[in-house]
């Protein structure tokens, strides 16, 4: 991965797939299956556009939310 490289993913993407692609196998994820589930777990609430959470050495930034 190049420094400053960005990826756009759907919140329904399985978290295990993203962990595998980014080489984050040791990341503790709890009982969640998707990127959106991880973000909700980390924030302790439903996300809003602009929210950011850490995902290992990466930052996940919420661009939009669908309800």
Image: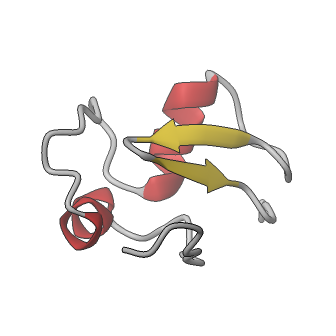
Q: Quadrant of residue 57?
A: top left
What percent of the width, then of the height, locates residue 13?
Answer: 41, 70
Residue 12 drawn above or below residue 57: below
Locate residue 64 relative to residue 5 in the image: left or right. right
Quadrant housing the N terminus: bottom left
Going 53% across and 28% down the picture, which residue do you hit?
A: 42
Going 63% across and 27% down the picture, which residue do you hit?
A: 43
| Count of marks overlaid on the render | 0
Residue that extends furthest to the right in the rendered view of this protein: 49
What percent of the width, then of the height, locates residue 64?
Answer: 81, 65
What percent of the width, then of the height, locates residue 48?
Answer: 83, 45
- Model colouring: secondary structure
Quadrant housing the C terminus: bottom right
Residue that extends furthest to the front in the rendered view of this protein: 3
Going 37% across and 41% down the picture, which residue do you hit?
A: 56
Residue 55 drawn above or below residue 13: above
Nearer to me, 48 or 50: 50
Residue 50 drawn above or below residue 66: above
Locate residue 64 relative to residue 61 in the image: left or right. right
What percent of the width, then of the height, locates residue 35?
Answer: 46, 56
Going 55% across and 64% down the picture, which residue do you hit?
A: 11
Residue that extends furthest to the top in the rendered view of this protein: 44
């Amino acid at each position: 991965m190049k420094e400053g490289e960005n990826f756009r993913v759907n919140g329904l993407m399985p978290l295990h797939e993203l962990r595998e692609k980014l080489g984050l196998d040791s990341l503790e994820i709890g009982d969640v299956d998707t990127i959106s589930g991880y973000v909700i777990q980390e924030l302790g609430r439903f996300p809003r556009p602009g929210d950011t959470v850490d995902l290992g050495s990466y930052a996940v930034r919420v661009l939009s939310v669908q309800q």
